[in-house]
Structure formats: C-alpha cells, structure tokens
C-alpha cells in the first residue's frame, strides 16, 4: 500500500511541493478524523459532501483561489457550489507558496489535477466495494459516484470508506475534451465575501487585546533617529508606548489613529542621522546611468558581429529611452499582526512570500520557522510588493520590543511610497544597422541601471544578473543577423523589489518603440515589418528561454485584425502595436487606439490577443488582461524621483495611478490552445506602454522616448 | 473625553474617542466594522467611502464629531445578505480582483444610483474620480453600475 505521504510526494514532485496533512482540514463539530476523507494536503471531503480545497498560493486579485481549486474540482468532478476554499500555511505541507512571476497556474496545474484524480479513483473504489461491482463500472459526476442500474452515492456518504483506501499512484487524468469546469467562465470565489465587506485582508485582522502600531522611519534611505522625546507621543490619548526597532521608532497605541497621531507628535521631536544616502538624487543617478551607456557592461546575448555590422551599415539609427523608478502603490498599505508567547509566535498578513516571511520573522525573533505560525490573509494588492519581507520582519520586531502583542503594525500611504521596494529607473541606448538592401542587419540594446536581482540574492551578483535585468530585451524575438544586448549596472542606495511585469516593462517599452522607429524610418508598416522579421520560424532559443515564434505571430495577427489595423481613423487618432513572448511562455500582442487633442492623450481602446496555453478560467484571464493594461497605462504617467536621499512622492496625489475615466475599452481575444497553461498576471503589462506610445507616434508623428510622459511633450 | 452618538447601519452607537478621530478609525478600530478600508488617509483613493445620511463621503476625511447625530451606512449595512442591486450587479459582472477597494466603489455606486437612477458615462466618470483600483477593475465597475441602474430605491 502506498502511504498517503508517499503519494503526496509523488503528486507534488512537479511543483517542488512536498505535501502532508494540513491543519485546516481538521474535523469540525460532529465529525471525526475518520469520517473526513483527506487524501492529500489539497483536499478534504466532509461527511456532508462539502469539499475543502486548500490553495498552495496566495490570492492577491489574480484569481488563484478560483483557478487552482478548479483544477482539483475538474478531476474530482466536484459540485462547485459545495467547494470551500482555504489558503495554505507555510510549513512542511506547503514549502513553496511564493506567488510571483505569473507561475501559480503553471506550477500547480499538474499536482492539483493529480490530487483530484487520485481522490476520484478512491471514491469510485469505495462505491464499487459497497455495491459489490467493479470500479470500472462506476463514474463520477458533480459530487456523486454513479454505478450500474442507477446506483448513486454522494461523496460525503463515501468519505469515511474512501479514507481507508490506499492512494493510487497514477490515477488517470481527464482528457481536455471531457472538462466540465476548466475552460468555462467561473466567477471569483471570493466575490460574495468581498461585496459584503466580509473578506478579511491583513489589515482587517482583529485579535483579542490587539494593539496598533505605526513606525516612525527616517525619510532618507537608511537613516536612523538620533534623539527624540517620547513624552510628546505618550501625551496623545491612547498611546501606550514608544519602542526602538531596527527600522525606527514604533508608537504603540490602542487604535490606529492614536498610533498615527502619536507618531506625528514624536516626529516633531525627532532629529535624524541621515547617513550616506542623503546626497542621493535622481539627476545624479541619471548622470551615472548615462555614463554607463558607453562604459563596460555584462553581455546577456551576443550573436553575429554587431560592431562590424553597424560599421558596415548603410544607415544607423540610434535612440535613448528612459524609464523611471516606479512604486507598487497597493491600495492596502503594508501591515502585519504579531502575537508572541513563550517560544512561539503567530502572525497574520498578506504575503506573496509566506515561507520567506516566516523564516525571516522567526529568525528575527530567535525562533525556528516551525515555531512561527503564519496565517496568510487576502492581499489588497501585491504586484510584487509583498514578495518583500521587510514589513513582516519589522512587525515581528515591533511586537517583540513591545512585549508580545498582539500588535498590528500599519503603514500609511506616505510610508508606502517612501519605503516601498521600488522598481528602479533604467536608461536604454539602442542602435539599429540597416544594410544596403534596406534590411535590419544589426541591433544593439544597452541597458543601464540598478540591478533588481541583487535585492533577491542578499546583495550578491548572481550569474544570471545580465539576463534578468535585460529580460524582454535579450529575448528580442525578431530574426536579426547581429544582436548584442548587455547590462551596465549602476549602484544606487535604494531598496529594490520586483514589480508587476518586472524589468520586462521598461525593456519591452524601449525595444518595441525603437523597432517602430526603425519601421517608420524604412517606410514600412509596423505590423508587416514585425511579421516579416518574425519570419517562418518555430521554436527559437534565447539563452535560458525559448519561444514559439508561430504563437507570437498568431497573437500579433489576431490583435491587428480584430483592431482593424490599417483602417482609416479620425483626425488626431492613431493605432500602435507591440508584442512579446513573456518568459517564452505567454504570448501577448496589443493594439492601442489613441487620440491626441490639444496635447491631451486619450487611450480609447486596447485590443489584446493572448496565448497562454489552456485558459483554465477565461473570466479570470480576461480580468488579468484588463488589469495588466491598466497597470501599464498607469506607468505612463507615474514616477518616483529622489531628492536628498528621499522620495519626492508621498501619495496618490503626486504618484498618480489610472482612474476609471481614463480606462480604455479593453477587448481580449484568447487564442484557443491545448498547450499546458501558463500565466497571465504580468504578460499584458509590458506591451501596453509601447502599443500606446507607438499609437501616439501614428497620431502625431511625435516619438516619446521617456516615461513618464511629461506635460506638454505631446 | 465626551461620548459621541451616531447611528451605524441602523443601530445607535455611543463612541468614546477624540472628536477629531476620523470616522474610518471609529468604524474599523472601535466598532469592529472592517469592511470600510484604509487606503490613503489623504482623501484621494476612495477605499474608505461610506454613506452619511445617504450621501457618499470619505470616512477618512469625516471626523467623529461631524458624523455625530447622523446616519452612517457601511458596506456591511448596505444589505443583510448581499442582495442590494449594486452588490448583485458586482457579482454578476465579476468585478472584484483583489477586492480591497471594492467596498468603497460599491458605496459610491449605490449613492450615485440613488441620486441618479440612470447615470451617463460622464456621471460614472465623475462619481469614481476620487477612487483608485490598482488592479484595474474599471471596465467591470462601469458595466456593473449600468447593470444596477434603475434598481436602487
């Protein structure tokens, strides 16, 4: 007999998950451990027929609490109305809950289906034994096992018997043609809780005796308080204590408002040791980046002889592109709640890195990770920000300094903008060599800026740094005889982090806009030019990635056709397009229709074609396209700039994000595919910016090479 | 500290807090109604929107003193069971992504439709001008408002 744990190891192998019994499936009143069918960490079926699916990733709006349970429910033929969804907890059951890189569906799709399929075979076997028939004579449908002669038993009635059976190793998976749930539009599982205000985000956690804390941090990166008068803070009604923590001074109070007021009072008395970063500024960084455009760099891709091809070219085009620091600006500010007891801790938070958060907070507290129970709440916006563990470790330190908690540390909007793990600025220099026959013979793309990857490697320079920082540039999919893409690192003292679409956003912006410049310079239609450069190729390898050029061409053609590429437009209107094969897994093309009237840009419509393999939940997929485009368009107008070591921006008033009135119509076309599903959280973001700016050129013949678009530039 | 009296979701409440305490924190920290969200505290994101005597207001910019003697309705009080036409439309259009800003959006939508049963696109633009959804649910918000149009009494 295969033990349950053995099965789980097999089932989880593909995703790096080693799974076991999950606490959340413990028996409820009226049940016993024997009557709950709990064959793996993902699934428990209760005697009343309720199926509890535990999601091994965190929900931040990208829909994993809907899409991932669908995979289990599909194989198990669950009644979707009887599915309950819980989020897993980091620990032995869920060792890799990290949620980022648009990988949640692709990494869990197979293990989740296997978990459902194994349970289905066990329920069939239990029914067959009861009916004294062969399991092969049984089938499943919507929460029931059906047998010969109209026999029918609910999963709940079979739960206890199924729990006694061995877990099969290789339960057959369904054919896609037999899917009843996957591929259909399923509304967000948490929708009803969200619209009634019942959904619990990290900031909504309330524990008995809970207090609230705000941390006074130096506005200058890395600065520390030198002197302060805590009496001023304590004079505020509701303030209980002021404690020193590594990031600053924490004001503990019996309400969030009292903590904020106490912090304001404390700030007025505090002097700072601003430290080495006090002279850091955006203009100074830009000067360093510009110098780095011509200095040494690390190769990410080098094919042919670009220098020779450029020297021999009949015509060389050259341009500089610029993308600023960006903030995540999640609407739910950072927060985490901590309760300490002797030799143990419990935390509640929204985290995209629950395992890292657990490990680092535990270390800060002098505990082992298993001594810290981390409860993952819903996330009020992630976009990469909550991959960071700065806020969770700080919250643990506040609770420890304040004597145990439970304490909820709450950031406000200014904290969020100032102490974000920002996505860094980059400068890009691109050159294109056109040969005597008018063909694109050489392409070089130099990227200069701080390296995001170091924020993930403890400050070390990883071997993959150049590839990571040039992602979206080094994998330029067009057939060009000589290509050089390299990265010149420029140091900056700012803490950095991943951002929705990562470096692919600035890199694809520069690449796809410059390619548009080349097309126009050659008098070629930008769509035709791209299709010709993509050519008749299949799978092409770019360093660590490969992409199927046929799939990329297909999305480009579909987006262009659906958008009416080439049609006559009203005066002042323009169409622009861009495409990208995201990490070689998800293919996206967008056509933007814009108008520029009296210098004011309006994006009317974005037509998007995507190929992400099998679309597990088309409703969720379309939401990601709409949201990704909104995120990209926001970046056209937002930036973080630095002065005297601190951000200039402190809120949504000076870090504008897209509002409803400026949201274009989005039309999404999903390419039907039987390929394994990939992700859709990020791929729509990078193509939105160049599609819009190429449309601006089509409308105005003005080429915008700098984001954000400055007033009066159009 | 004087006690302040207000009606929240139809229930009379007495609150002991400073007069300048924003209604947002009275709701969330004192009364335990966490459906109303904190987004910016600067009056520019709309996540904290509630109804004050039927009108949409930002609870982070409304003091306890200003709310005293008035009827406050939060997302928890919009309906007993999610049956308000705006909540139903929100489900039908599958609006929410992360969902954090949605209670504020829903409260603004409900106030708009009470004021104007059949709002134009321009009315919708204006009603949500002070709201932020970083996930980008805007197209579905517009659709949901139109779906609920005429249904709010």
Image (cartoon, coloured by chain):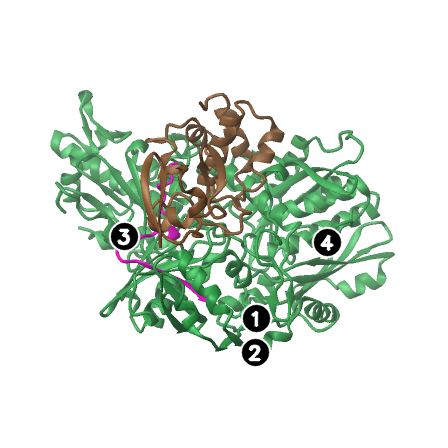
At label 4, counting other C-alpha atoms closer than 10 Å, the crowd grade (few under 14, some 14-19, many 20 or more) is some
Host chain of mark 2: A
In the rendered structure, which disc, 4 or 3, sits on the residue that comes first in sequence?
3
In the rendered structure, which disc, 4 or 1, sits on the residue that comes first in sequence?
1
Report the Cα–Cα distance between label 4 and label 2.
48 Å
> A86 or A68, which is in the foreground?
A86
The residue labelled by disc 1 is A220
Q: Secondary structure at mark 1?
A: loop
Magenta-span inclusion, residue A95: no
Q: Is residue A494 visible?
A: yes
**Predominant secondary structure, magenta span:** loop
The residue labelled by disc 2 is A275
> A261 or A594, which is in the foreground?
A261
- Tell me where the magenta segment starts and ends, as one range: A196-215
Q: Can you tell which quarter of the image residue A489 is in?
A: bottom right
Q: Secondary structure at mark 4?
A: loop
Residue at 47%, 48% (x, y): give it. B60
Image location (x, y in percent) of residue A323: 67, 57
The residue labelled by disc 3 is A8
Host chain of mark 4: A
Of badges 4 and 1, the one in the foreground is 1
Please tell me if label 2 and label 3 are on a single chain: yes
Left or right: B56 as drawn, with respect to A144: right
**The furthest residue to the front:** B2
């Amino acid at each position: 007999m295969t033990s349950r744990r053995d099965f789980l190891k097999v089932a989880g192998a593909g995703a790096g998950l080693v799974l076991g019994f999950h606490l959340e499936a413990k028996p409820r009143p009226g049940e016993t451990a024997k009557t709950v069918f709990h064959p793996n960490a993902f699934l428990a079926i209760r005697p009343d027929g309720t199926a509890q699916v535990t999601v091994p990733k965190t929900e931040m709006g990208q829909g994993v609490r809907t899409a991932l349970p669908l995979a289990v429910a599909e194989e198990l033929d669950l009644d979707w109305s009887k599915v309950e969804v819980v989020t897993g907890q980091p620990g032995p059951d869920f060792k890799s809950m990290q949620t980022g890189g648009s990988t949640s569906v692709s990494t869990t799709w197979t293990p989740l289906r296997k978990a459902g399929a194994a349970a289905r075979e066990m329920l069939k076997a239990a029914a067959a034994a009861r009916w004294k028939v062969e399991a092969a004579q049984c089938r499943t449908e919507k929460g029931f096992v059906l047998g010969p002669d109209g026999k029918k038993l609910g999963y709940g009635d079979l739960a206890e018997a199924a729990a006694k059976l061995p877990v099969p190793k290789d339960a057959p998976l369904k054919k896609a043609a037999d899917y009843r749930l996957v591929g259909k539009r399923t509304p967000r599982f948490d929708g009803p809780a969200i619209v009634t205000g019942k959904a619990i985000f990290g900031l909504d956690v309330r524990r008995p005796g809970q207090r609230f804390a705000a941390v006074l941090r130096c506005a200058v990166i890395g600065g520390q308080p030198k002197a302060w008068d805590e009496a001023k803070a304590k004079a505020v009604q509701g303030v209980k204590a002021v404690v020193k923590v590594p990031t600053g001074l924490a004001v503990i109070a019996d309400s969030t408002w009292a903590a904020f007021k106490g912090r304001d009072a404390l700030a007025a008395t505090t002097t700072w040791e601003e430290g080495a970063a006090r002279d850091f500024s955006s203009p100074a960084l830009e000067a360093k980046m510009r110098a780095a455009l011509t200095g040494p760099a690390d190769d990410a891709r080098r094919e042919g002889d670009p220098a020779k091809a450029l020297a021999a070219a009949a015509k060389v085009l050259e341009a500089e592109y610029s993308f600023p620091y960006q903030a995540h600006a999640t609407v739910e500010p950072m927060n985490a709640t901590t309760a300490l007891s002797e030799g143990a801790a419990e935390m509640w938070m929204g985290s995209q890195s629950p395992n890292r958060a657990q490990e680092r907070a535990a270390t800060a507290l002098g505990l082992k990770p298993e001594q810290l129970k981390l409860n993952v709440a819903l996330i009020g916006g992630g976009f990469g920000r909550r991959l960071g563990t700065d806020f969770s470790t700080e919250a643990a330190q506040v609770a420890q300094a304040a004597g145990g908690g439970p304490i909820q540390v709450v950031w406000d909007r200014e904290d969020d903008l100032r102490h974000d793990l920002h996505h860094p600025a980059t400068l890009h220099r691109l050159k294109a060599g056109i040969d005597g026959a008018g063909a694109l013979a050489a392409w070089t793309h130099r990227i200069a800026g701080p390296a995001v990857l170091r924020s993930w490697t403890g400050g070390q320079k990883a071997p993959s740094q150049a590839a990571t920082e040039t992602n979206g540039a080094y994998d330029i999919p067009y057939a060009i005889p000589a290509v050089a893409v390299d990265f010149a690192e420029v140091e900056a003292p700012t803490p950095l982090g991943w951002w929705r679409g990562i470096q692919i956003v600035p890199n694809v912006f520069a690449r796809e806009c410059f390619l548009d410049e080349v097309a126009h310079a050659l008098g070629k239609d930008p769509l035709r030019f791209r299709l010709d450069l993509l050519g008749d190729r299949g799978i092409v390898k770019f360093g660590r990635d490969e992409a199927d050029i046929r799939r990329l061409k297909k999305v480009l053609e579909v987006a262009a056709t659906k958008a009416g590429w080439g049609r006559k437009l009203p005066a002042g209107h323009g169409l622009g397009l861009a495409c990208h094969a995201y990490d070689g897994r998800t293919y996206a093309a967008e056509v933007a229709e814009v108008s520029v009237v009296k210098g004011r840009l309006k994006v009317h419509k974005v037509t998007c074609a995507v190929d992400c393999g099998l679309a597990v939940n088309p409703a969720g997929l379309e939401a990601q396209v709409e949201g990704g485009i909104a995120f990209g368009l926001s970046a056209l107008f937002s930036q973080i700039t630095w002065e005297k070591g601190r951000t200039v921006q402190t809120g949504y008033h000076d870090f504008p994000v897209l509002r409803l009135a400026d949201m274009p119509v989005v039309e999404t076309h999903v390419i039907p595919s039987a390929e394994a599903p990939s992700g859709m959280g990020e791929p729509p973001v990078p193509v939105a910016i160049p599609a819009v700016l190429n449309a601006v050129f089509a409308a105005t013949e003005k080429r915008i090479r700098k984001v954000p678009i400055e007033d009066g530039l159009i | 500290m004087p006690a302040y009296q207000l009606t929240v979701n139809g229930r009379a409440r007495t609150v002991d807090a400073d007069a300048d305490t924003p209604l947002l924190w009275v709701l969330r920290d004192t009364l335990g109604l966490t459906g109303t969200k904190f987004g910016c505290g600067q009056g520019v994101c709309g996540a904290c929107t509630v109804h004050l005597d039927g009108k949409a207001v930002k609870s982070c910019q409304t003091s306890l003193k200003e709310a005293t003697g008035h009827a406050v309705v939060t997302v928890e009080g919009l309906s007993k069971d999610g049956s308000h036409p705006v909540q139903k439309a929100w489900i039908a259009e599958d609006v929410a992504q992360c969902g954090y800003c949605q209670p504020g959006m829903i409260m603004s939508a409900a106030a708009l439709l009470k004021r104007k049963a059949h709002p134009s696109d321009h009315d919708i633009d204006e009603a949500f001008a002070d709201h932020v959804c970083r996930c980008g649910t805007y197209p579905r918000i517009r659709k949901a408002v139109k779906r609920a149009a005429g249904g709010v009494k």
